Image (spheres, rainbow, N blue to C red):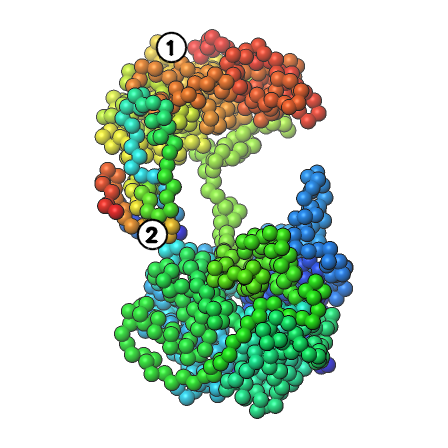
């Protein structure tokens, strides 16, 4: 057989531009306009991959996005390689390199093919049944499954390509550039509507554009010529945007659609430089017209998966569009008229069609007459019972169908062939329609699910074959009719088109074709990619699976990368037949986005690397970087974690920082704490309602710690709030809680207490905060602001003063989160770094030590101060935290008050915050570790460690924990069981250091 | 993804908003006078209707105003939008 199956006549492929490419390392040639699939077929290569489970040889089966077999890996480069790409959708470019997937060591010799002979051992649900237990074996099973499953390989290095997102708005979006889509776009755009026409191919016109036969005529022109002229016309309409190589992946409510526009994948590498590879379009359309067409169904018979078995309409496209013969001795097997069109095309191109096997008894139409005139043999009422050939089909066995189609009769006749076209009818592409919320109805006469016009979401219609119109005249007339109503057109365009076409006379459908052998002895494949057969579906039904969704998952039918585009209808049909149900009642499985796979690149667009998330840096950040801080992510903030010196570990740095802060002076960048400016004549009343303690009597110039609850009584956030004036406060929140606290407070003000005159403004970024603590903190502040009276009488703990550094206003608070005498300087952020540097300079003689979040956490733990979100988890009340002192018992109401004496919150055996000391003072507990009383099984879990550190100031390990009934258990011994040891601990008070708070005024 | 007509800003994409659950659940004026059951009713019980539902929404990435939305949860169709404190439109 010749290795060049290209015929010369062609309008679509540029045979003057030769393109070289490699497939599995072999250098081959194609032409400009080819897909990888058409170029391979032109080189007489059918075998492109191995099937998923049995590793059977599989060939190119279609010419579009429904391709189940020809899934390849494109490119070798570890950052640019693309797995799981359909060869039928790859436009050929110079230098393309593609590889078969799922075969080892090569597509021609595949070790996994042994599974084919083991197939009786690999029925539906095999994995589920076999790999169930014992649970401890799962890791070993998983290894085995993953290695034998292996679809494509993901790239191992970051993607170098550029991707983009774009918001698109239009009046009308037309999805699909076939004849019905083009008619729709023309009607819409000519009305002046801003219209977008999207098609996933590189050209417009769908299958009509190569429908060159005088049986199909529009206004006395062949349909392809008529359509070509129409396309030339619409290309000139200024308010019509045409997007080729663009596929709609998802259709959400309110006409919000996602589409992927391929911009460079068809170009040679040197033409791609610095261009955007793919663009994700986020489209809002006022109206949507779905014209996504239909795909051809296969037929289900034994060994229907051999390389060389191709959908009949795809054979037609390969010969008519690409000028490629898929074989030199082709037979066709059909249940409808479309295979006759293929036969006519093949015949015209000089390819011999030996026989057409049609399961129908009397399919008479202009098409069949033309076939018979051409001398092609039609076997009516026959079926194929088996095929032969391993890496390529060699022959077919044909037998007569019984009247009822349930069995075969007579003798078996074998026909030789190197290619078999199959056509099981057409399935409208309703995926996008159902994604958008539309409901389908079942049309019994040709077994299709089509959009139910009464259950179509508003502002969209489906037209053409995606709406169930398969004959040319129906497609055109119904499209025009529907679009006119949909868009409110009154023009008489196309009112009198003269359409001539062939009409199908007879239909016959058999979901699972009978064989002369019992089902147990044959392999009729349903889902080619996932290797599930009709037998698997029947087995699932026998085992009690009834719902289509369950059968699908149990047999994995329709769960491959093709999402069952070819297999779903047959699976449904076989279930309906076996269970005696009507397909309409059975319904379909859910069609979920994306319709075709999206790349991760397109999904994330520019949101990669430093753009993946916002990074918030304090105004002092550069200083921290210069001084070698290690950073911790706190929400979006970068906070200094610790400042290692001379190769210190984190532990060593934190021990040094913690000691320095208590012995002399430490400084912390606390700018990330949330700051909310609260003003209005009801500000005090507002704080009374949101905090658990009382606020009305707080004097101007004083600060107070507040605890905020949810209405369920659980601690939500905490922080110090300062009264700046009669009706003016500044509230601080935790770093992580800032945005949520502001939203929550706004919610109450707007919805529950609109009578309160209060205004909230976030000033977190406007002010920077540095906290200086330790016995020498006062001397440092004195050096920076000599005029400030720092005496305890004038400036006591929990008070604030307005001041100036040079001429810049600042607020100095005397508040402490470490238990040390300390000050907080709040200054507008653009001066913060300068002031920080002054503090460092002024503190030099006192060995002022910058510290990060880790030391802050340690110091506050020594004092037993909680960190909301670390020691609390939304299940602890103030009482659980041993903070009953902060509940304003006399207050009439505050958020969460009523919940504090619900039957559940007053239980005494709630988990409560306690301190823990390890019996061995050197032993540091792990945060999250469980606490138990005894190791006797079953072990009762009493609680867990929430904070744990080695305290350099106490020279022992300390921890906070929540423990059931913990308040009553002071002095009790508990055990912390770890993987290789058990640690003995004793429950203590939560305050470990300076219980009398002497150091605050030291 | 639906479009919400913020009563203060106009039509905006759903991504700009956050949903605050069922609307017209008023915080009791005198919580301390309620029994555990009455308080639990306010605190925990929310409707989850397939069909017309009254909801609170916040234009969180916009004007930050709260308002009410009447939405059909079965198809996300929004039947009405009205400000806090306004009476719901008659069904
Ligand atoms: Zn708004």
Residue A178 image position (x, y, % from top left) = 45, 73
User: Label 2, label 1: how many angstroms apart (C-alpha)?
Assistant: 64 Å
| Residue A976, image quadrant | top right
Question: Which residue appears at 34% of the width and 80% of the height?
Answer: A494
Residue A539 appearing in the image:
yes
Question: Which residue appears at 65% of the width and 78% of the height?
Answer: A400
Q: Which mark is residue A893?
A: none
Which residue is nearer to you in this view: A27 or A911?
A911
Q: Identify the chain of the residue marked 1, using the numbered disc in the image.
A: A
Which residue is nearer to you in this view: A67 or A924?
A67
Give the residue at mark 1. A792
Which residue is nearer to you in this view: B13 or A53?
A53
A476 on left or right of A527? left
A450 on left or right of A458? right
User: Image height check: is A202 above or below A495?
Assistant: above
| Residue A949, image quadrant | top right
Identify the element where label 1 is drawn: loop
Which residue is nearer to you in this view: A56 or A948?
A56
Give the residue at mark 2. B77
Question: Which residue appears at 47% of the width and 37% of the height?
Answer: A636
| Residue A712, image quadrant | top left
Looking at the rendered image, the quarter that the N terminus of chain A falls into is bottom right
A52 on left or right of A505? right
Q: Residue furthest front?
A: A403
Residue A971 image position (x, y, % from top left) = 57, 10
Q: Residues within 10 Å of mark 2 (few under 14, many from 20)?
A: some
User: Image height check: is B18 above or below A697?
Assistant: below
């Amino acid at each position: 057989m010749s290795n060049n199956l290209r015929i010369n006549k062609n309008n679509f492929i540029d045979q003057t531009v030769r393109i070289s490419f490699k497939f599995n390392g072999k250098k081959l040639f194609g032409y400009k306009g080819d897909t990888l699939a058409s170029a391979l077929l032109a080189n007489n290569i059918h075998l492109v991959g191995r099937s998923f489970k049995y590793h059977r040889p599989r060939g190119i089966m279609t010419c579009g996005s429904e391709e189940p077999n020809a899934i390849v890996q494109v490119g070798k480069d570890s950052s640019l390689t693309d797995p799981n790409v359909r060869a039928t959708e790859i436009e050929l470019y110079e230098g393309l390199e593609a590889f078969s997937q799922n075969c080892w060591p090569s597509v021609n010799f595949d070790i996994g093919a042994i599974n084919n002979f083991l197939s009786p051992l690999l029925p539906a649900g095999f994995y589920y049944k076999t790999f169930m237990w014992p649970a401890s074996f799962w890791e070993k099973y998983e290894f085995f499954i993953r290695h034998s499953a292996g679809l494509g390989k993901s790239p191992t290095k970051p993607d170098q390509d550029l991707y983009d997102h774009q918001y698109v708005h239009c009046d009308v979006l037309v999805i699909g550039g076939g004849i019905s889509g083009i008619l729709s776009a023309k009607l819409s755009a000519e009305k002046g509507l801003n219209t977008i026409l999207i098609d996933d191919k590189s050209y417009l016109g769908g299958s009509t554009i190569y429908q060159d036969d005088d049986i199909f005529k529009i206004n006395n022109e062949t349909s392809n010529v008529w359509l070509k002229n129409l396309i030339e016309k619409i290309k000139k309409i200024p308010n019509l945007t045409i997007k080729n190589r663009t596929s709609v992946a998802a259709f959400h409510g309110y006409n919000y659609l996602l589409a992927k526009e391929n911009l460079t994948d068809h170009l040679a590498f040197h033409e791609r430089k610095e261009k955007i590879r793919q663009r994700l379009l986020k489209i809002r359309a006022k109206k949507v017209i779905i014209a996504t067409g239909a795909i051809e169904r296969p037929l289900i018979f034994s060994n229907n998966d051999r390389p060389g078995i191709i959908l009949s309409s795809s054979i037609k496209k390969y010969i008519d569009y690409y000028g490629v013969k898929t074989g030199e001795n082709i037979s066709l097997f059909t249940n409808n008229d479309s295979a006759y069109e293929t036969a006519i095309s093949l015949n015209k191109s000089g390819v011999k069609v030996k026989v057409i096997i049609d399961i129908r008894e009397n399919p008479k139409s202009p098409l069949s007459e033309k076939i018979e005139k051409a001398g092609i043999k039609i076997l009516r009422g026959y079926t194929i019972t088996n095929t032969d050939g391993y890496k390529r089909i060699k022959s077919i066995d044909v037998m007569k169908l019984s009247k009822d189609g349930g069995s075969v009769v007579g003798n078996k006749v074998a026909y030789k062939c190197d290619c078999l076209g199959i056509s099981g009818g057409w399935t409208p592409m309703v995926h996008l329609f159902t994604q958008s919320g539309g409901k389908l109805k079942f049309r019994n006469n040709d077994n299709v699910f089509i959009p139910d016009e009464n259950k179509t979401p508003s502002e969209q219609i489906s037209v053409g074959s995606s709406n169930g119109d398969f004959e040319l005249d129906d497609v055109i007339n119904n499209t025009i009719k529907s679009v006119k109503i949909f868009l409110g057109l009154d023009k008489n365009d196309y009112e009198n088109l003269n359409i001539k076409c062939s009409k199908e006379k007879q239909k016959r459908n058999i979901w699972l074709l009978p064989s002369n052998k019992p089902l147990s002895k044959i392999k009729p494949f349903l889902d080619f990619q996932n290797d599930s057969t009709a037998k698997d579906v029947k087995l699932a039904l026998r085992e009690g699976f009834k719902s289509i969704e369950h059968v699908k998952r149990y047999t994995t039918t329709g769960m491959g990368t093709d999402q069952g585009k070819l297999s779903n209808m047959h699976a449904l049909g076989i279930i309906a037949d076996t269970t005696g149900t009507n397909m309409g009642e059975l319904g379909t499985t859910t069609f979920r986005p994306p319709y075709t796979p999206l790349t991760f690149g397109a999904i994330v667009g520019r949101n990669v690397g430093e753009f993946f998330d916002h990074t918030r840096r304090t105004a002092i950040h550069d200083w921290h970087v210069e001084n070698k801080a290690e950073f911790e992510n706190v929400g979006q903030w970068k906070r200094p974690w610790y400042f290692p010196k001379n190769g210190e570990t984190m532990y060593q740095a934190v021990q040094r920082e913690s000691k320095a802060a208590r012995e002399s002076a430490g400084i912390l960048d606390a700018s990330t704490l949330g700051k909310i400016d609260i003003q209005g004549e009801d500000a005090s009343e507002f704080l009374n309602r949101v905090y658990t303690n009382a606020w009305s009597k707080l004097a101007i110039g004083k600060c107070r710690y507040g605890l905020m609850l949810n209405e369920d009584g659980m601690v939500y956030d905490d922080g110090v709030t300062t009264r700046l004036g009669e009706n003016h406060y500044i509230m601080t929140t935790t770093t992580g809680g800032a945005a949520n606290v502001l939203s929550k407070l706004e919610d109450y003000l707007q919805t529950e207490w609109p009578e309160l005159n209060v205004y909230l403004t976030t000033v977190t970024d406007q002010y920077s905060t540095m906290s200086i603590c330790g016995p020498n903190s006062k001397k440092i502040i004195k050096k920076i602001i000599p005029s400030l009276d720092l005496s305890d009488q004038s400036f006591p703990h929990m008070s604030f003063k307005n001041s100036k550094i040079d001429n810049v206003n600042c607020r100095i608070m005397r508040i402490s989160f470490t238990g040390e005498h300390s000050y907080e300087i709040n200054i507008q952020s653009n001066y913060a770094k300068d002031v920080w540097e002054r503090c460092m300079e002024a503190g030099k003689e006192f060995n002022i030590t910058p510290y990060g979040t880790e030391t802050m956490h340690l110091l506050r733990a020594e004092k037993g101060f909680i960190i909301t979100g670390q020691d609390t988890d939304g299940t602890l009340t103030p009482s659980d935290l041993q903070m009953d002192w902060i509940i304003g018992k006399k207050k009439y109401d505050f958020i969460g008050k009523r919940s504090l004496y619900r039957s559940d919150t007053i239980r005494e055996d709630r988990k409560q915050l306690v301190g823990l000391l390890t019996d061995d003072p050197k032993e540091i507990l792990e945060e999250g570790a469980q606490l138990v009383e005894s190791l006797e099984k079953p072990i009762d879990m009493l609680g867990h460690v929430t904070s744990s550190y080695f305290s350099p100031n106490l020279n022992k390990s300390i921890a906070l924990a929540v423990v059931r009934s913990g308040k009553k258990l002071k002095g009790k011994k508990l055990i912390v069981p770890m993987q290789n040891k058990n640690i003995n601990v004793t429950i203590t008070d939560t305050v470990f250091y300076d219980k009398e708070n002497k150091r605050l005024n030291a | 993804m639906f479009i919400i007509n913020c009563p203060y800003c106009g039509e905006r994409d759903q991504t700009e908003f956050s949903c605050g659950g069922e609307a017209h659940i008023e915080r009791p004026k005198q919580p301390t006078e309620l029994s555990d059951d009455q308080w639990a009713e306010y605190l925990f019980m929310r409707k989850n209707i397939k069909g017309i539902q009254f909801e609170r929404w916040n234009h969180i990435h916009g004007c930050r105003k709260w308002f009410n939305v009447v939405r059909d949860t079965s198809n996300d169709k929004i039947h009405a939008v009205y400000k806090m404190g306004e009476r719901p439109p008659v069904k």
